[in-house]
Amino acid sequence: MKNIPDVKLGIIAVSRDCFPIELSVKRREAIVKAYEGEIYECPVTVENELDMLDALTDVTLEECNALVVFLGNFGPETPETLIAEKFDGPVMYVAAAEGDGDLINGRGDAYCGMLNCSYNLGMRHLSAYVPSYPVGTAEDIAKMISDFIPIARAVIGVKNLKIITFGPRPQDFFACNAPIKGLYELGVEIEENSELDLLVSYKAHEGDKRIPAVCEDMAEELGVTGNNYPEMLPRMAQFELTLLDWAEEHKGAREYVVFADKCWPAFPEQFGFEPCYVNSRLAGRGIPVACEVDIYGALSEYIGACVSADAVTLLDINNSVPASLYEKEIKGKVDYALTDTFMAFHCGNTPSCKMCADRAVKYQLIQHRLLEPEGSEPDFTRGTLEGDIAAGEITFYRLQCDSEGNLRSYIAEGEVLDVPTGSFGGIGVFAIPEMGRFYRHVLIEKRFPHHGAVAFGHYGKALFEVLRFLGVKDISYNQPKSLPYPTENPFK
């Protein structure tokens, strides 16, 4: 199942009729030549509304799902902005810098035209991506186009996404409060089901002929040391097939699917295992399965998967790093204060490709204490993928709809440190600059839940632009010491 969009990009040049059209054509051709990826060059240069319709017909026939509108000169304000209104996909606006001709017949004034373009986009309440400095040479704009690709991929994905849920949130987990009003504002569809629906479907997959092949794939992924409970693989394979089939059969008019499932307390006893390892496998294939029916966690994960084109995970912002561990393993080795560090954890849903080599299928210690007889061997609480998360750069982020129905988000870049945790679950020692202040003045102050999505790499720039494109006004980040938060007490 392919669950991440491919971007088919087109470029349309526009030209104001009192400027030489050849200027826009020549400059568009230079961009296409400079760009190293695939891009469809629309032969129609837009000077008026009829040209605009012809250009849109052309790029639609070529199956373009994202556009670059290029102001090769000043540009026609109405037709160029109508492109964004009528095109069904994300649109980026960029403009030509001067310097490839004389300043009499070779001057395009696109620097000025971008101002009127922006004004007209605002008049029409249209969303478009405008780079931080949208005026440049062919080589500059080729780089802007490369930056636009992951943004476009995420926007296309969100606009064609269905979130499928199973079960209400567990008791006392109102931290995953999820007003669905925000989903509809983003253009996301949702289908809510009961755990019983899932159980019925799971039982219907008993004896599925595909189970042995999935078991073989699981065993290969886990290796000898990671496959602690080979007798459980058929149950977990049956569940994986259940989710994949449900996605195909229920995505309806949407192209992409993510899940937000209730995973405790009833699930393990009724299904006979913990779902975490299966969840990790699907997340590794671009189909996030958020724990504890965290609807906006699933959405956040999916955005990160689209931006990074890589596996993502969802973790608790879980516990502080003990001072003794900080002193022994961190202080003096990397430039982080104790309050910059924390441990992020979940039971076992992080894809194996993002964990250390000794990761293995184990059992959920907390639920074993809660649900199984004291002193007994773990039974139905087995099925977590546990181990330390591999060291490397990360982006910790979340998009959330608050209790008042307002969309808000945060983004913070940092890293997983190469420090053994000495703990259980899928867990890592994370470090984010000025995390202590960010924790107090963003996470607590703005009442974000304990779940955060993790992309493996630094993707803050693209995530910020995606969220802005989607209309999210409140985007927080970990501000440096030189920039106090509005709620920060200035009297230290």
Image (cartoon, rainbow, N blue to C red):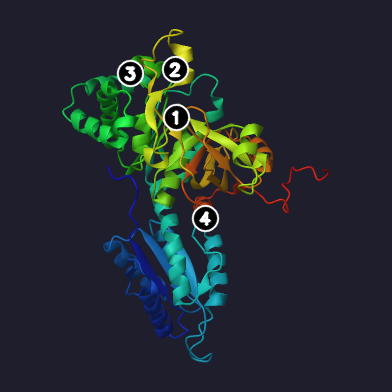
462 vs 111, nearest the viewer: 462
Compute the Cα span from label 3 to label 1: 16 Å
Left or right of 219 on screen, residue 91: right
Which mark sits nearer the N-terminus, 4 or 2?
2
Mark 2 — residue? 265
174 lies above or below 452: above
Q: Quadrant of the N terminus?
A: top left
Asked if residue 446 shows in the view, the reply is no
404 lies above or below 137: above
Which mark sits nearer the N-terminus, 3 or 1?
3
Q: Is the Cβ of the residue at disc 1 closer than 8 Å to that at disc 2?
A: no
Say the numbered circle drawn on residue 291: 1
Which class describes the residues within 10 Å of circle 3: few (<14), some (14-19), or many (20+)? Answer: some
284 lies above or below 8: above
Mark 3 — residue? 271
Name the amino acid type tagged 1: Cys
Q: Quadrant of the C terminus?
A: top right
Mark 4 — residue? 465
Q: Residue furthest right?
A: 491
Q: Nearer the viewer, mark 3 or mark 4?
A: 3
Coordinates of residue 199 in the picture (x, y in percent): 31, 20
The part of the image, by quadrant, that contains residue 256 is top left
Which class describes the residues within 10 Å of circle 4: few (<14), some (14-19), or many (20+)? Answer: many
For the residue labelled by badge 4, is the local secondary structure a helix, a strand or a loop? helix
Which mark sits nearer the N-terminus, 3 or 2?
2
For the residue labelled by badge 3, is the local secondary structure a helix, a strand or a loop? helix
Coordinates of residue 483 in the picture (x, y in percent): 72, 52
Which mark sits nearer the N-terminus, 1 or 2?
2
Compute the Cα span from label 1 to label 2: 12 Å
Compute the Cα span from label 3 to label 2: 11 Å
Name the amino acid type tagged 2: Pro
Name the amino acid type tagged 4: Glu
